[in-house]
Image (cartoon, rainbow, N blue to C red):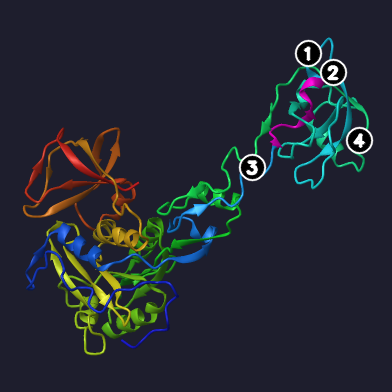
Amino acid sequence: MSSPAPRAAGHDHQGPDHRAGRPGHRTGPDALWSVEDHLADILAAVRPLEPIELNLLDAQGCLLVEDVTVPVSLPPFDNSSMDGYAVRVTDVAGASEEFPAVLEVVGDIAAGLAESPHVGPGQAARIMTGAPLPSGAEAVVPVEWTDGGLGGGPVTGMRARSKAPEGAGGQVRVHRPAEARAHVRAQGSDVRAGDRALAAGTVLGPPQIGLLAAIGRGRVRVRPRPRVVVLSTGSELVQPDEPLAHGQIYDSNSFALTAAAHDAGAIAYRVGAVTDDAETLRATIEDQLVRADLLVTTGGVSVGAYDVVKEALAHVADEDEPGSGVEFRKLAMQPGKPQGFGSVGPDHTPLLALPGNPVSSYVSFELFVRPAIRTLMGLPDVHRPRVRATLTAGKALTSPKGRRQFLRATHTDGSVTPVGGAGSHLVAALAHADALIVVPEDVESVEPGTEVEVVLLG
């Protein structure tokens, strides 16, 4: 394949021969790989992407690669936690409904106000939530503890008056005493300047994004989300909303896997179904290399006469692309026995070739592609959680000897129930599953009530 346009700066790609030293390497066309060996081979060849600096919203879901220090305390100044009046403690000592403290209102203080009046003996300043505590004041009394000043009452009325050009004038009656610092948020009570706000290795979710914005950080250094391109193959595939002719089916795999890649944290690109032509597929993959950190194909990896992925990629390694190539394998699993893995292009972009049956492709994605995506992101935990649960079923589950079976299921309160049959074409049952039951290679039957291993997909 010819060289694509340069990739985005900061992306680290595989070296000259990412397949060297593969763990558990098998040889021969009939060699049978274990699930563990195939996954280990993939993860050994995929390295986290190089860090780049991103705007906050673009960094959501990414791994922070630097400690972030607080440049300014939060809050940056003492401020009011209530709508009310900033007062001196001695002026409201002993105040009650019967004998209120009567104070002169010297002005209004709104949030964001650059200047505020000084509060002296016998005085108060009307203050809004978040506004800075004025000099001289020691506490804030909520507006509910007062007559609202100038005959006012509700908070809305108080806010409306704060917009008037002249804030000073009038009196307020305070009906309760206040202790020092009452209803005052102290400077630095959240975090102080010089504190570590977030540690390297933090995954940035909404609260972390909010904290970074609050301390004034608009950009951060993170490992970016990988760009994943998904291609489905098959001349029988038709896009949704188009009419079906005899022998045709709708392309569901590219939609499901693109959505799964996005769910895993990637920037996912879907390519429409490619016809069963090896040269067309090779050209399509070459065109997509410019925007891919990982390529995923589905279909055309078994032993059929029209398995064009194998035809197009099995001999891609040549003198112009040393170290690249895709190897096609048989795995000791069901569904998903045929798999392909390797790299293509001058940057040795990883490529995972998945089977075409909808259940096979999705299970393969969860077991192999999702961990690869999470590894590219540099995340510490790349696998779906696994638990033990009690099998709830009307009859025993059967499983082929020597194959690890993954059965669609629903998981609730420590029990797991199969949904649908074992067929790898039963996509409707997959839509109702939130878990996979794992039946080991050496187990041929599982009775109801047995504790089984479960992969949680939710």
Pointer 1 and pointer 2: residues touching (CB < 8 Å)? yes
Q: Which corner quadrant of the image does residue 445 belong to?
A: top left
Q: Residues within 10 Å of mark 1 (few under 14, many from 20)?
A: some
N-terminal label among 1 and 2:
1
N-terminal label among 4 and 2:
2
Q: For numbered disc 2, what is the local secondary structure?
A: strand
N-terminal label among 3 and 1:
3
Q: Which residue is mark 1?
A: 94
373 displayed left or right of 332: right
Question: Residue 29 location in percent, x, y?
Answer: 8, 73
Can you say which quadrant of the picture contains the N terminus?
A: bottom left
Give me the C-alpha separation between circle 4 and circle 3: 27 Å
Give the residues in magenta.
79-91
Q: Say if the magenta span includes residue 86.
A: yes
Question: Residue 292 location in percent, x, y?
Answer: 38, 73
Q: For numbered disc 4, what is the local secondary structure?
A: loop
Please tell me which residue is depicted at 73% across the width and 21% down the height of the picture.
178
Q: Nearer the viewer, residue 173 or 116?
A: 116
Residue 404 visible somewhere in the drawing = yes
Tell me which amino acid carries mark 2.
Ala
N-terminal label among 4 and 3:
3
Q: Is residue 164 above or below residue 268?
A: above
Give me the C-alpha separation between circle 3 and circle 1: 31 Å
Q: Which residue is mark 4?
A: 168
Q: Residues within 10 Å of mark 4 (few under 14, many from 20)?
A: some
Tell me which amino acid carries mark 4.
Ala
